[in-house]
Amino acid sequence: MARRVPARARSVGGGPRSEGARPGPKTGAAAGRGGAEDALHVFDELLRQGRGGGGGASIIRGLNRALAAVARDSPAAAVSGFNRMARSSDDAVTPTLHTYGILIGCCCRVGRLDLGFAGLGNVIKKGYRVEPIIFTPLLKSLCAEKRTSNAMNIVLRRMTELGCAPHVFSYNILLKGLCHESRSQEALELMHMMADDGGDCPPDVVSYSTIIDGLFKEGNSDKAYSTYHEMLDRGIFPDVVTYNTIVAALCKAQAMDKAMDVLNRMVKNGAMPDCITYNSIVHGYCSSGQSKEAIGILEKMCGDGVEPDAVTYTSLMDYLCKNGRCIEARKILDSMIKRGLKPNVITYSTLLHGYATKGALVEMRDLLDLMVRNGIQPDRHVFSILICACTKHQNVDVAMFVFSKMRQQGLTPDVVTYGTLIDGLCKSGKVDDAMLNLEQMISEGVTPNIVIFNTLIHGLCTSDKWEKAEELIFEMINRGICPDTISFNSIIDNLCKEGRFIESEKLFGLMGRIDVKVDVITYSTLIDGYCLAGKMDEAMKLLSGMVSVGLKPDTVTYSTLINGYCKISRMEDALSLFRQMVCNGVSPSIITYNIILQGLFQTGRTRAAKEIYVRIIKRGIQLEISTCNIVLQGLCKNNLTDEALQMFQNLCLMDVKLETRTFNIMIGSLLRSGRKDESKDLFAALSANGLAPDIVTYTLMIENLIEDGLLEESDNLFLSMEKNGCVPNSRMLNCIVRKLLHKGEIGRAGIYLTKIDKNDFSLEASTAELLILLVSSGKYNQHMKGLPEKYHSLVKSRDV
């Protein structure tokens, strides 16, 4: 029992408070009667009895219980109650150490750490024997304010000076504070000090769990894992929290094998995984693209009696939606509802976003209806998803309808929602409607940002409304949103890419009039636009203008111009500019060299290209695989396959990381040269170099097998490709169909036509023309039944 020396307690909080002070409305249970107000009523009654001289020790115990109940819901009212006790002249109601503990906790909770320390000062002055628990709220508050060093001073020095030995809970507060300040190494050293300090206060499972979590969050996985093993060596058994920390960190790093090992060890050690554990693993498998394993974990947790929650299902749905598998995601949602689990707004938003990405507007509408029927009202985020989807897929009228529906439901659009709608209206040519929405958002007190103004300026420029665009720029300035160089450069870049050079130059001129600095990027952007359009004379005029205003063209500027000349095969001009660039002290980058090499090879100037390549090597410029691919491709296109093969073999011996594309260049060239055995050897060598064939590799090899009449081998290679996770695209399937049709293999072509239809791919014009040509010839009429049903009409139309 704490002892005190007789002395009157002082009020805390600066000045007297009214004894009639009451807390706000009831917010929770207190003193067994419910609510801070009831607890305060009990407190008042006990205080009255104590002042009357009755009750003794039971009165002070009751007062402390009532005060603690008040403090849970209304710290300010509890401080007022303490002050009334402190001002009382009766010893029976004088605050005890417990009362001061309540007071210090209240002061810390309302952010008055200074008053909390004042309360501690009173405790020390009155001669109470302080206990570690009275320091707890002060330590927590200091750590929350990232003043852990001050908290450490209290625990390691002041508490000992006051004859109060810190307990493990005091140290754990420090460990947590250090980890929150990303000082996990210091926390680890402090914990080792606890362990080595004579055993008075050894670390517990919370100590280790806190540090392991901190180390993982700082990316120090190896040390976290070694700390986990240290914990086991000391005979401290991890609990579910520890295991969840480790599993979550491993899953975040996509180290799923290790995560599963920890899960198995967790079960073996008697710590049963909970929903949080399984959610981490489901998310980890989804993040690493292993959906089958994620579904397997979902089934396992159900089998183990752990009920999945909305987070579990949402993680899985999010992965499926991001990979375009919305049908499967919808099945997951339906199974979730079937199990009696209510999806939340995030779950619905995830699937809505998936539908939006695919442009499945009908499915979006149906899901929205289901969401409302199930009692989940769409929030602003949901409506923003719908509006974004509609505008993205050119359904701006539907977007406007959704926007009005949002307002009808009492939701105020924010700057993001308005920005999405305005962007959609501008892109669909409805700039006047976009401007009306700008006026509406301003009238509603929503401040437009620079992104919205940039969108509108761009829209007005593309709609030939330059005067309004200029007015809007000045309105921006009046509103304190100053368009900077970056904003202008972005709009000019977009206009140049659309071929709107007149508007680009007007914006360029306006920059000077409103004192917005024109920089190298501005000029380079305009130059790039003219180069893309093949207007090299105008581009060179800009280069001269740039130099005349004191701006020095950089590597990007010169590379852009050189690329422009190469695109229109003016190699002499390109080489002249290249030499000028070097003379002006601007060092060519590897990109510059790549542009020159590509231009020389395309114009058949292989000797000059090889000289440039040798110059790159001699100058010690870091050789990139992109450069090697350009040279190999150039040699092969100019029928210098032997030289290309020699260079390829040299690259294999060098410290250059080859790509699948490098192999594809050589395989294609060898096949065109009739050197089929060598191409097969290269195909087999891919895996030895740590590479996998891609869609281009498989297309080259399958086309070659069909050409040689090895149809079963080509079919087997196609199946092997799918098994290896390489999904055929439209171009590949069309190539295979054309190759088979050329060989007269109508039935086999029908199999691949079915694959085209199944994947919703389009039949390319050349494929359709060849198919019609074969049908019209009548030569393969008896084989046409091997085609999918939809193509039988071609045969019928011929017969007619």
Image (spheres, rainbow, N blue to C red):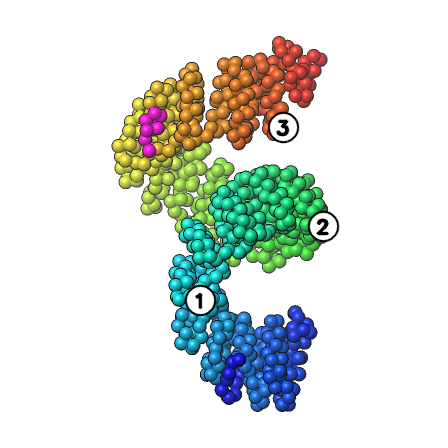
Q: Nearer the viewer, mark 1 or mark 3?
A: 1
Q: How many marks?
A: 3
Mark 3 crowdedness (10 Å alpha carbons): few <14, some 14-19, many ≥20: few
Q: Is residue 238 magenta?
A: no
For the C terminus, the image quarter is top right
Q: Which residue is mark 3?
A: 758
- Judge whether residue 314 can be spotted in this image: no
Mark 1 crowdedness (10 Å alpha carbons): few <14, some 14-19, many ≥20: some
- At 53% from the left edge and 56% from the top edge, which residue is drawn? 239
Q: CA distance from mark 2 to mark 1?
A: 54 Å
Q: Nearer the viewer, residue 766 or 198?
A: 198
Which region shows up in magenta?
Answer: 648-655
Q: Is residue 498 above or below residue 132?
A: above
Mark 2 and mark 1 in contact? Answer it, CB < 8 Å. Answer: no
Q: Is residue 512 above or below residue 609?
A: below
Q: Nearer the viewer, mark 2 or mark 1?
A: 1
Q: What amino acid does circle 1 point to? A: Cys
Q: Which residue is mark 2?
A: 374
Circle on res. 569: none
Left or right of residue 340, residue 742 in this image? left
Q: CA distance from mark 2 to mark 3?
A: 34 Å
What is the chief secondary structure element of the magenta stretch?
helix
Q: Which residue is mark 1?
A: 201
Q: Going from the N terminus, do you reach mark 2 or mark 3 first? A: 2
* x and y percentages locating residue 259 in the rendered image: 50, 46
Q: Is residue 650 magenta?
A: yes
Left or right of residue 233, residue 775 in this image? right
Q: CA distance from mark 1 to mark 3?
A: 68 Å
Callout 1 secondary element: loop
* x and y percentages locating residue 51 in the rendered image: 62, 88
* x and y percentages locating residue 257 in the rendered image: 49, 42
